[in-house]
Image (tube, rainbow, N blue to C red):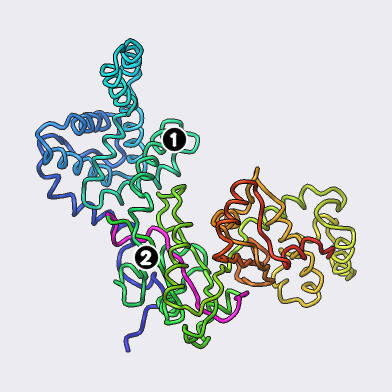
Amino acid sequence: MTQLPTSIEEQAAPSLFDRTIENLRTAWRDIAAFSREAVGATPRPHLPREDADRLRLQMQACLEGRGGEVSARARAAELGRTYLGLDSTGRRNFLHVLARDFDVDRATVDRAVDVFHQAGDPASRGDAERALRSALEPGRMRLLTQFNGLPEGIKFLVDMRAQLLEWSRGDPLLSALEADLKSLLKNWFDVGFLELRRITWDSPASLLEKLIAYEAVHAIRGWQDLKDRLDSDRRCFAFFHPRMPDEPLIFVEVALVTGMSGNVQTLLDEAAPVQDPQTADTAIFYSISNAQKGLAGISFGNFLIKRVVDSLAAEFPNLKNFATLSPIPGFRRWLDAELDRESGGEGVLTASERNRIAELFADPDNVVPEPCDRLQALLDRPGWHRDDAVLKVLKPILLRLGATYLVDVKSGNRARDPVAHFHLSNGARMERLNWLADTSDNGLRQSAGMMINYRYKLTHIEANHEAYTGDGKISTSSQVRAHLKSTG
């Protein structure tokens, strides 16, 4: 049997990003050959001012559309190849030219508004409305749309927006360009265009490699780990766009088990026996990953879960429960901020809890921190989760604080924790807090090892969704409510 490489880094193949760029350059090379007369000298990688002036003329030629459709595609392909050939500084300069010099022409808008106000009869008013809409569309929108007509063009635009999201912070010009591109992508990635596909070990190796690279919740440790996650008692589903057939947009990993899983290390244990999926009564969604940074803020994860539930219910009639095993990524950040604000130990901890924590520092050889720092000191201590004395004290305290954070801490009318907000918006119920459910470094760092099951009860999804999105009401189980009432 061929030995599988233990990690992506062991392979000699270039990175996914480098291969994407090379694929685009190759795909557009022959198309771009038709526009050589309009290009001039190849710009230098950092796109200095004099090269940017030639780039501006190149963009203008794309907008003018001389020579018919073939020439227009050729010019767009050459413009895209120009962008791909630039370094980071050059690409930023490219985007600034696009944002600054191909914005809405305010003078044209003013004239169109005047004509609109002067239009008297319905026919002329309709013409004036169309002219005003056209004037309000910046030239950069038409340029961006031209890339969509090229092979791999929509992937090019998704990756361009990923870069814009990073560069647009504090830059009004690039923020406006990013907003324009987002509006285009939102229309093109309407859920009605997306295809749900199951990914298996027999899927193309290039696609499996992308799962390893894109997994954002529980890192895939190598090919054997991935193979285990695609075994007969596991499922992986992803949304694809017809213009990006080999690129998952978002994917979910599911374990078919008996009972509600409460520990991710157990769930992902490579030595665990494979269960007959026909005997499973519960589907655990343990990882949902957005694969394309450039589609941030364009939501289709809720549709993914609903489609996967329908698919699993049809394949396995014995499934009675659909639930997640989810991280609580904002808990420690919130807790640390609350403890930092405490004065003399007052705040999120009760007097009883503070006393019990203080007893853990009774050893005279220990340097005793201030009362408000003691819980943080314990959680920052390496190996605290293996100390029975510490666990006995901290378990009820952290479960109460975890429930408080998830249920009571909000931003406006929504849960502050982003994962909680996602699942509550989709109609889930907070079912069970799980103690030491993720003892990886990341799990301890972000949530003191706790995870939560969100349950999707099919008959309650719509009512839960309406209650949360309408009034901010969070559906919780009796177990979660009991943690809220605990005094530690």
Please give left or right for residue 303 compared with residue 205 in the image.
right
Q: Are marks 1 and 2 in contact (CB under 8 Å)?
A: no
Circle 2 packing at 10 Å, graded few (<14), some (14-19), many (20+), is some
Quadrant in the picture for the C terminus: bottom right
As helix, strand or loop, the secondary structure at mark 1 comes to: helix
Q: Which residue is mark 2?
A: 210
Write the residue at 52% across / 86% down. Answer: 271
Element under label 2?
helix
Magenta-colored stretch includes residue 143: no
Q: Residue at x 13, y 34 (%)?
A: 38
In the image, 258 versus 13, the foreground residue is 258
Question: Toward which corner of the image does residue 333 lie, by quadrant?
Answer: bottom right
Choose top left, top right, bottom left or bottom right for residue 392.
bottom right
- In the drawing, does residue 256 fall left or right of residue 164? right
Where residue 92 sits, quadrant-wise, is top left
Q: Label 1: few (<14), some or many (≥20) within 10 Å?
A: some
Q: Which residues are magenta?
A: 243-262
Q: Position of residue 416 (x, y in %)?
A: 64, 50
Q: Left of 172 or right of it: where is 341? A: right
Q: Any mark on residue 175, and which?
A: 1
Q: Position of residue 347 (x, y in %)?
A: 83, 51
Principal secondary structure, stretch drawn in magenta: loop
Tell me if residue 250 is in the magenta stretch: yes
**Which image quadrant: the N terminus?**
bottom left
